[in-house]
Structure formats: C-alpha cells, structure tokens
Amino acid sequence: MMPAYNTIGFIGLGVMGEPICRNLVKKSGKRMIAFDVAAEPLARLQAEGAKAAGSVADVVRQSDWLFLCLPSAKHVRAVFEGDGILKNIRSGQIVVDLGTSSVGQTREFAKLLQAKDASWADAPIARTRQAAQDGTLSVMVGATPALYTEIEPLIGCFATDVTHCGDVGSGQVTKILNNMVLFETVNALAEAVAVAKQNGVDPKLLLDTLSKGSADSFALRNHGMKAIVPGNFPERAFSTEYALKDLSYALELAADAGLKIRGAELVRTILQEAIDAGSGDNYFPVIAKHIGR
C-alpha cells in the first residue's frame, strides 16, 4: 500500500531520540511530526522543520511510518494502549520500535497490529549518543523481508550498519544479547582495574596493554578507557537502571528457554547492588566504583 501522506511520526526525543529524529528531518525528504512530554527537544526540532504534535494520538493519526524511541517496554506499552497506537492505527501503517524492549511484548504488539492490517517492526539501536548525532548507529531489525525492504532506507538516515536479524522479535533478541555481553565484559574490566590498582599497575597502562592482545574489545576501548579509568560516570548517559532493565530481558529469554546463565545472573546482582548504593542514574560502568565496598 502506498503511503497516503508521506509523513514520518516520531515519539520519544530523549538522549538518542532527538538526534535520530533530527537526522530523519534532514535526510529523509519526508514530512516529520514529533511528540515528547518534554517541551525543549520538541521546540528544537520544530525550529529545524519538524511539526510538533499535541499527543500520541495526534502523531499516530497523521503519520504513515511511526518511530518510537522510548526508555523501556513499560513506556512502549503506555503509548500503545489507551488513546494511543492500537486505538488510532490505520490499515497500512508501520510502527518501528527503536528501543530495547521485551521480546514477548514485541511479538504481542505485532500480532495486534497485524489484525488491523498494520505492521510492527523491532529495530533496536546500538552505539553512542555521538553515533546518533553523526547518523552512524548500528540497528538490528526484526521484520518480514517485505517490511524490512520498506523501512531500511529510512533507518539508513541515522545508521551505517543495518542488519536484518529475522522475523519480528529477532532484532530485540540480538540487541538484548549484545547488551548482555557488554555488561558482563564491563564487569570483567572493572574487576581487572580494581585488582591492578591494588597491585601497583596503572589502570590506563593495563587497558592500553590489554587492547594490544586477546582481551581487546569495544567495551575496553570505550567503557574501560573512557569511563572506568578516569572515573567518569555521568547521569546523562546509559544508566545502571537501564542496564538492569536490558539484562532482565536476557534473563527472561533464558528462563523461557530453560537455560541457566550464571554470568548474567551475577551481573544482575552487581547492577542491583550499585543501584542500592545510590548509582542507579549514573552511567552503568559506575559498577567499578563499588568493587570491594
């Protein structure tokens, strides 16, 4: 079905959502309508050519493609229910969820939209806020081949690596496991730095040296060198609370499959302890601060 209005809707203009929406405004060549509960990012995007919507329902009614960039499955459900997506969706409309969310909920929402002749794709994003600004994100997509073909050019406005992971839900599975591996790796780096400090080895030298061998990783070069070594754990970054939320999705998948994943279970405990100690809003490598306390 050809889109009636050639309009992209966007809900969620937070740390990642605002720069993603900005790239769509600049590169898609399509009309943009956006909504967020915060007035400031909405005003900034309005100044750059997007139209501001008054509500979730307003965005849904006016858009052909609807992108969501929200913090959690709970937030996605909030815009799906009530006077939101399900109530106002039209035949042929496409919803693309860019957040990391529950696989079960993703598949549930896809079925509900399918019954209304509309489509749901999961397309969780990876990489940093800087990558979102630069339009160089990595996106993992769960969608039918036909739907993937339709949305991939739009995702290409803000991503340089777009992977079709399979049918609906598979993008979420892939992203959730990416994050699980990242959290476990960051914990290993935090432990290595703590032991190095206590044994007279400079943490920066340690990670510089590890980066030249088999322990090298993206996590080491970014989370290790840029956060753990300098002790830089800002609040406007991917928080410990968010990390625990994403890890819970991985543990849910494992439990559903009858698998015991002990490394992830341990990191869940470590993240929870950091939250209990008051670091819930800090960048999640802050777990390094709490080793030995």
Image (cartoon, rainbow, N blue to C red):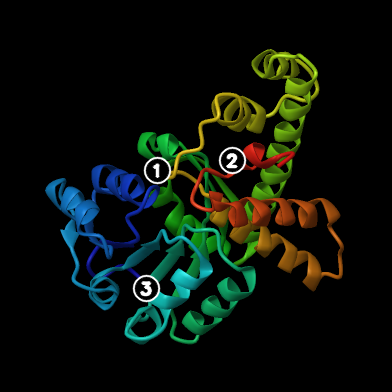
What amino acid is at disc 2? Val
- Badge 3 element: loop
Kindly identify which residue carries mark 1: 158
State left or right for residue 289 relative to residue 117.
right
Front residue of this view, candidates 225 and 179: 225
User: Of the numbered discs in the image, which one, if any, rests on residue 286?
Assistant: 2
x and y percent of residue 285 in the render? Answer: 60, 39
Can you say which quadrant of the picture contains the N terminus? bottom left
Front residue of this view, candidates 245 and 119: 245
Report the Cα–Cα distance between label 2 and label 3: 41 Å
Report the Cα–Cα distance between label 1 and label 2: 29 Å
Kindly identify which residue carries mark 3: 93
Q: What crowding class fits label 3: few (fewer than 14 Cα within 10 Å), some (14-19), or many (20 or more)?
A: many
Front residue of this view, candidates 292 and 117: 292
Residue 165 makes an appearance in the image: no
- Identify the mark nearer the N-term, 3 or 1: 3
Determine the residue positioned at 52% across, 43% down.
283
Q: What crowding class fits label 2: few (fewer than 14 Cα within 10 Å), some (14-19), or many (20 or more)?
A: many
